[in-house]
Every structure is written in C-alpha cells, then in structure tokens.
Image (spheres, helix red, strand yellow):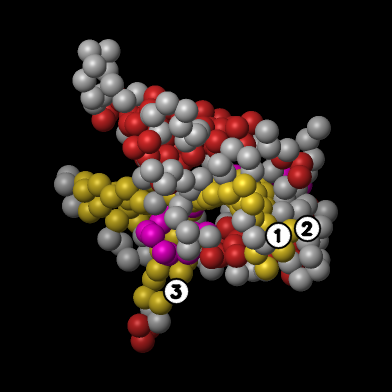
C-alpha cells in the first residue's frame, strides 16, 4: 500500500552531483533537519553508504550514532538517534575490504550482492526518505564483483576486457537506480560526482554525471530533480555553496551543466531542503 511523504503530497526523486567534498551529503541530510524544525513525524532516512568512512559525517553529526551491528551477511549498520531517542538515519555500509578474494571458493557475498538483497527487502513505508551515497561508489562496487568474481575471465580463459565490467555497471545502474530507486514510493536522493568533457567546437567544458557511457547524461531522464552543486566566490572572496537547478552555463560561465527541476526549485539557491521546496509549497498554499 502506497503512503504519501510526511511533508509533501508527492514524492521527490533527486539526483545531486558535484565535486568531492562540495556538500552533497550535507544537502541530503537537511531533509531530516526540516522534519525536526517543523516537528513533523519522524521516520528515519535509510542511507546505503558506498563511500568510505568519514563520508558519513553529515548524517552522524546530526544525532548520537549507535554502535555498529552486523546484519548477518557481512554488512555493518548503525542508527543515528535524535534528542528524543527517535532514529533519524539508518546507515548500511557497503564495501569490499579485499576485492581480490571475492572469487575464491566460499567467499562472502560482495558489497553489491548484499546491497541487492537489502534493496529487494526494503519496506519503503518505514522510511521518510532513502539515499544512495554515492552513485560513483555503487559503480565501483559493481566493477569489483565483475572483475574478481562474476566476469573475471572470457570464454577463452583470458582476463576479461574491462569494457565488459563497465557495461555490467551500466546495467546495474539502469536496473537498481533508474528503475527501482527512481520509482521508489518515498523521497529518493542519489549523490554522484562529475564527468568533465571538453567541447572543442564550442570552446568550453561540458559537465555531466559520472556514470558509464551514455548514462552520464541519460540517467537524468528518470529524475524530476537534477541539481549540480558547486561553490561560487562572491565579493571579498566570500565563498558559498549553491545548487544549480536549471540547465545551461554555470555561475562562472566556464562550462555547461545538466540540471532541471520539475518542482521549480530556485536556481543557484542555498542547498537546504526547506529552500529547495519553498516555491512548490507556496504554489500549493495559493492553490488552496
């Protein structure tokens, strides 16, 4: 049975990309800030962490993290509890400490295989939102299991060509991200990094999403919100983080970016959920 989100009468699925450390996960975590600020019902946000330790700090710092627990398949997880002992975030960590051992007999499941089990068993109604952090780490997890376990050798016994592994990563993104997560009955956040290509004919760079092949631009078609996050330098060298929500040239006119917003998020806005959704909330108030 489908349930509506806690804060809006529709689901918002967001792909947010930018350079490492620009604050993508920080933006995602501001959704819980919004629920707390307006004292809305708190359901935890589920986060599938494919990025290394330390990248989870935007979630951990918003409450009290519990000790790690093993979910029984080698996946470690923890909760982040709020001031009233309510769970704010449910973090599951996916990594392969020794990828070369994935293909040996009786090896444990890879991080990607464990994630698939988690994705299939998710009770969407139990969460206020879900997040895949990040698409880049997810891609690398698929590459590892292909390289060392599932597609290690060709039919002739030679090491498989790397293009086969990237093709499998593209299919995984199409099946798990562009199909399942993009259509999930809850708010969805996908963080990703930037793929930079030079457009020699027009004389500037084109910045797309770091994903295999044509998915670097094609993945945007299944998301209602695609934001490019970057840093602008203003007067007196003051730097501020912004979300570009409209496609075209960035604020420095150095390159062209993929961006769109079906909910009318303000362009070059402060990266907070409350700000991003302010326009659509105002429209709904006028409509009533």
Q: Residue at x 40, y 82 (%)?
A: 238
Q: Residue furthest front?
A: 105
Q: CA distance from mark 2 to mark 1?
A: 7 Å
SS for dot 3: strand
Q: Is residue 238 found left or right of 69 in the rendered image?
A: left
Nearest to N terminus: mark 3 or mark 1? 1
Where residue 240 is drawn, which disc sits there?
Answer: 3
Where residue 88 is drawn, which disc sits there?
Answer: 1
Q: Nearer the viewer, mark 3 or mark 1?
A: 1
Q: Residue at x 39, y 71 (%)?
A: 232
Q: Nearer the viewer, mark 2 or mark 1?
A: 1
Q: CA distance from mark 3 to mark 1?
A: 27 Å
Can you identify the residue that label 2 sits on? 42
User: Looking at the picture, does residue 190 appear above or below residue 231?
Assistant: above
Q: Residue furthest bottom?
A: 236
SS for dot 1: strand
User: Looking at the picture, does residue 251 appear above or below residue 158?
Assistant: below
Circles 2 and 1, Cβ within 8 Å, touching? The answer is yes
Circles 2 and 3, Cβ within 8 Å, touching? The answer is no
Q: Which residues are magenta?
A: 9-25
Where residue 226 is drawn, which disc sits there?
Answer: none
């Amino acid at each position: 049975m489908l349930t509506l989100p806690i804060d809006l009468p529709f689901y918002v699925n967001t792909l947010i990309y930018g350079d490492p450390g620009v604050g993508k996960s920080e933006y995602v975590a501001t959704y819980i800030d919004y629920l707390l600020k307006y004292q809305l019902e708190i359901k935890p946000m589920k986060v599938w962490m494919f990025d290394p330790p330390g990248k989870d700090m935007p979630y951990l710092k918003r409450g009290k993290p519990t000790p790690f627990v093993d979910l029984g398949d080698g996946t470690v997880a923890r909760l982040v509890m709020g001031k009233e002992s309510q769970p704010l975030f449910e973090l599951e960590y996916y990594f392969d400490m020794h990828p070369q051992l994935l293909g040996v007999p009786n090896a444990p499941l890879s991080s990607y295989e464990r994630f698939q089990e988690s994705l299939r068993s998710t009770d969407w109604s139990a969460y206020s939102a879900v997040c895949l952090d990040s698409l880049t780490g997810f891609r690398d997890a698929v590459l590892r299991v292909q390289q060392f376990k599932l597609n290690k050798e060709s039919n002739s016994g030679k090491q498989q060509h790397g293009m086969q592994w990237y093709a499998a990563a593209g299919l995984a993104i199409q099946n798990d991200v562009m199909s399942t997560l993009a259509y999930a009955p809850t708010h969805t956040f996908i963080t990703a990094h930037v793929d930079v290509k030079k457009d020699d004919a027009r004389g500037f760079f084109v910045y797309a999403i770091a994903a295999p092949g044509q998915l670097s631009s094609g993945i945007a078609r299944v998301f209602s919100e695609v934001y490019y996050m970057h840093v602008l330098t203003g007067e007196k060298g003051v730097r501020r983080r912004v979300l570009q929500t409209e496609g075209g040239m960035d604020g420095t006119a150095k390159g062209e970016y993929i961006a769109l917003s079906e909910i009318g998020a303000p362009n070059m806005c402060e990266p907070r959920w409350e700000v991003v959704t302010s326009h659509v909330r105002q429209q709904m108030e006028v409509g009533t």
